[in-house]
């Protein structure tokens, strides 16, 4: 399989920084049985021409519908070479039916829409975008590192934050302009239509978690337990959150029953389960030293996490109440953990690319042999 080439673009959730683990920490995993996932290829998804360029990880809803952000056909050829390529969200149901969600074709007159986040729910897909309401074309000049210059047209109109709502069939329903007092970077929606937003204050870059009404206006700010979130939304070179910002620290929203889980990827901060009433429950996974949560795996039942560190290439099933590791899963050469969209009805759903088509993979986990059960070695110095 060609997964190394397939998932070569936008691996923003797979940056380096893997830590070593001590032999004592490794021994803690002996109580968590190891399973190996084997995949079966299904018929290619009809109606979708899939280039081998996807954004990882995939998303999923609890009915087993996967959501894949991909580069549409001809995407690299559109616009200046230095501009971010246009991306398209595609959903694939367990039966293989595909839908598209083109945010640039919504009925409202929004220009140069740039997606910041999206969140699929059982009935709605909501996008957080930045866009302009008018066109003010300006000619700009881009100079590459080799000194070559290129002129291009850009929209200089003021940009605002919007929420775009689609039904699960891919039909645009409504657009809301956000006027909250903070800048959101993640958006989620509860079954009632109430929204959850995670962002930061423009003044001090302090993280903020907020409930929004169905019309996008602020309902109230939430107060996570002290120490459960970083002091700054931005990551710095030394990881302190102080000094010049390098990039926005990665975070993720994933549905968990009727609640929403917030994870600070690649960090030691706990998981936060936010209910529709605004209550927050802290989940502290009991991970071995040197192992961190890379990202979450959506599931219709249990809590699954991708991990980074000495046990790289593994997925853990976590007890959502106690935080202990119940089981470990390895994918072998059939798929990489980041390509698994979700766990549905006990099956691991993933995708491959073959002959220009999107190919579903359905994985079954079986207990490994005793030889496979040995804990991971500590990294050599």
Image (tube, rainbow, N blue to C red):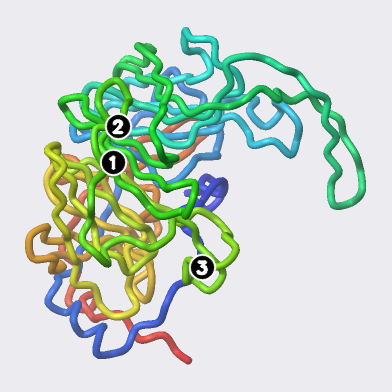
Q: CA distance from mark 1 to mark 3?
A: 23 Å
Residue where numbered disc 1 is placed = 210
In screen coordinates, is 302 left or right of 85? left
Q: How dense is the environment of label 1, judged by Cα within 10 Å: few (below 14), some, or many (20 and up)? A: many
Residue 13 percent across, percent down from the top left = 45, 54
Q: Residue 47 — which label?
A: none
Residue 65 visible in the displayed image: no
Question: Tag 3 or tag 1, which sits nearer the N-term?
Answer: 1
Q: Position of residue 115 (x, y in %)?
A: 50, 32
Looking at the image, residue 31 sits to the left or right of residue 14; the answer is left
Separation of marks 1 and 2 at Cα, in angstroms: 7 Å
Q: Position of residue 219 (x, y in %)?
A: 24, 32
Which of the two discs, 1 and 2, labels the residue nearer the N terminus? 1
User: Which dot marks residue 242?
Assistant: 3
What residue is drawn where x is 13% and y is 47%?
Answer: 279
Choose top left, top right, bottom left or bottom right for residue 113: top right
Q: Position of residue 217 (x, y in %)?
A: 32, 26
Asked whether 64 or 208 is in front, the reply is 208
Foreground of the two, 10 or 322: 322
Q: Give the camera-side residue of 376 and 89.
A: 89
Say whether residue 86 is visible.
Answer: yes
Mark 1 and mark 2 in contact? Answer it, CB < 8 Å: yes
- Picture disc at residue 218: 2
Q: Residue at x 43, y 59 (%)?
A: 232
The image quadrant that residue 67 belongs to is: top left
- Does residue 82 lie above or below 372 as drawn? above
């Amino acid at each position: 399989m060609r997964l190394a080439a397939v998932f070569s673009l936008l691996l923003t959730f797979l940056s380096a920084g893997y830590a070593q683990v001590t032999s004592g920490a490794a021994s803690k995993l002996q109580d968590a049985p190891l399973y190996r996932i084997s995949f079966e290829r299904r018929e290619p998804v009809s109606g979708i021409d899939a280039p081998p360029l996807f954004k990882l990880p995939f998303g999923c809803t609890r009915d087993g519908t996967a959501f894949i952000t991909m580069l549409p056909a001809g995407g690299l050829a559109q616009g200046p070479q230095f501009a971010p390529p246009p991306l398209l969200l595609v959903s694939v149901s367990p039966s293989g039916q595909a839908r598209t969600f083109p945010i640039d074709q919504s009925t409202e007159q929004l220009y140069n829409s740039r997606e910041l986040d999206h969140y699929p729910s059982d009935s709605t897909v909501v996008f957080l975008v930045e866009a302009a309401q008018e066109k003010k074309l300006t000619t700009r000049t881009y100079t590459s590192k080799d000194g070559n210059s290129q002129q291009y047209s850009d929209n200089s109109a003021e940009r605002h934050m919007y929420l775009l709502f689609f039904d699960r069939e891919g039909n645009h329903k409504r657009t809301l302009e956000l006027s909250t007092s903070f800048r959101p970077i993640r958006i989620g929606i509860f079954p009632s239509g109430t929204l959850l937003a995670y962002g930061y204050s423009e003044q001090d870059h302090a993280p903020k978690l907020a409930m929004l009404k169905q019309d996008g206006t602020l309902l109230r700010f939430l107060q996570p337990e002290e120490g459960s979130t970083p002091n700054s939304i931005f990551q710095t070179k030394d990881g302190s959150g102080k000094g010049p910002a390098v990039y926005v620290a990665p975070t993720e929203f994933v549905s968990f029953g009727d609640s929403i889980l917030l994870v600070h990827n690649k960090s030691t901060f706990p998981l936060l389960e936010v209910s529709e009433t605004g209550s927050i429950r802290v989940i502290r996974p009991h991970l071995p030293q040197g192992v961190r949560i890379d990202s979450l795996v959506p599931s219709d039942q249990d809590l699954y996490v991708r991990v980074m560190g000495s046990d790289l290439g593994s997925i853990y099933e976590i007890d959502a109440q106690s935080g202990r590791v119940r089981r470990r899963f390895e994918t072998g050469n059939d798929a990489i953990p980041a390509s698994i969209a979700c766990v549905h009805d006990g099956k691991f759903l993933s995708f491959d690319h073959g002959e220009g088509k999107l190919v579903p993979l359905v994985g079954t986990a079986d207990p490994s042999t005793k030889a496979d059960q040995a804990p991971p070695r500590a990294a050599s110095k």
